[in-house]
Amino acid sequence: MQTFIENLPKAELHLHIEGTFEPELLFEIANRNNISLKYPTVEALKEAYSFDCLQDFLDIYYQGAGALITEQDFYDLTYSYLKKCAEQNVRHTEIMFDPQTHTERGIAFSTVIKGINRAVEAAQKNLNVSALLIMSYLRHLSEESAFQTLTSSLPYKHLITAVGLDSSEKGNPPSKFQKVFKASIDEGYIPVAHAGEEGDADYIWEALDLLQIKRIDHGNNCLQDEKLVQEIIKRDLALTVCPLSNTALQVVKDLKDHSLKKMMDLGLQTTINSDDPAYFGGQVNQNYIDTQKALNLTKEDLYQLAKNSFKYSFLPEVEKTKYIEELAAYYLANK
Ligand code: ADE
Ligand code: ZN
């Protein structure tokens, strides 16, 4: 099973680039920028990676992102993740980035996007990994701040495919961002949002109806509402499920209790993703491996999950077909 998963062609659809910041690289970049970290060593930092809830994690995640200053930092961070994609047979990835985490600290939007994009272009050429970008608004900040981010992004619109919504979910419902999502759609961005990770099913309804999202990030709590499940199926929206994130943030107590298989059995279209792999103990392949073991997933289930990762990506149809055919050939030869 492990070899089958490792060689399985797949896409990653839920990944925060700031969440790929491995402690070793974090220390290297902090040192060259003369930034002193709260933790004296890589080991001490790693020990702090134990979380009671989403906010607990976010506090540490934003501190880590504070070491990123130059375009080269953003390049190094992104390229380092894309190399891991190549090693894991991740053929395509849709990378979220949080501009406000950086612009709030005085880093220019252009610095962030140029560094990330240069890495994406290099990976396409050198690693044969394709990537597109999702600009995520921070929901703990105001809608006005999101509007400023939208404006800053416009000179780089050709480099960004979608907009997302992340950070502290509870108390920051999708309705807070209805206007900026409408404006983002008018600019040609595809809308997605984190919904139902810690928030209840009514946050998912809002994300569907008020933000018009085309994919649901996490979505775990849709199972609270049978009508919602049917609506998600009717609209053919995929859930980007992140199993190791869910256990790390206590959304799910034990991987054995994870509802991924139940979701699949209900007819929901799901994918497996790593969310913030540097913080949650595993890259995307580890998410597949641990979930397969915990839920007894079959090769057919894994094939379906990988197929969904391409089908529900935002790639052009010809690209999707190319990857899905490659995956089908792999499955046929290895099932
Ligand atoms: N930002 C990075 N990871 C996140 C998550 N799992 N939920 C919300 N915001 C995030
Ligand atoms: Zn996320």
Image (cartoon, rainbow, N blue to C red):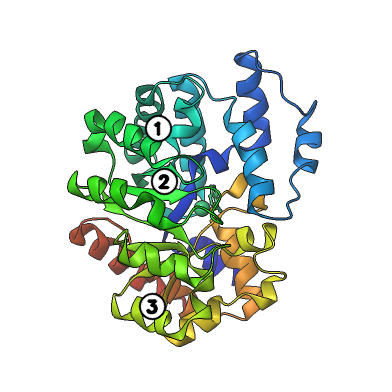
Task: Answer with mark 1 or mark 2, whichever residue precedes in sequence.
Answer: 2
Q: Is mark 1 within 8 Å of ligand 1?
A: no
**Crowding at label 1, few (<14), some or many (≥20) Cα neighbours within 10 Å?**
many
Image point 46% across, 47% down: which residue? 86
The Cα–Cα distance between marks 2 and 3, rounded to whole angstroms, is 29 Å
Q: Is residue 71 above or below residue 79?
A: above
**Amino acid type of the residue that numbered disc 2 sits on in the rendered structure:** Ile
- Tell me the element at label 1: helix
Q: Is residue 294 above or below residue 111?
A: below
The answer to whether 311 appears left or right of 87 in the picture is: left
- Tell me the element at label 3: helix
Q: Residue 118, percent across and down?
A: 35, 29
* Residue 271 seen in this snapshot: no
Circles 1 and 2, Cβ within 8 Å, touching? The answer is yes
Q: Is residue 311 above or below residue 49?
A: below
Q: Is residue 135 above or below residue 243?
A: above
Q: Residue 167, percent across and down?
A: 53, 47
The answer to whether 90 appears left or right of 274 in the picture is: left
Q: Residue 98, percent across and down?
A: 45, 38
- Determine which residue is flagged by label 3: 332
- Determine which residue is flagged by label 1: 116
- Determine which residue is flagged by label 2: 95
**Amino acid type of the residue that numbered disc 3 sits on in the rendered structure:** Leu
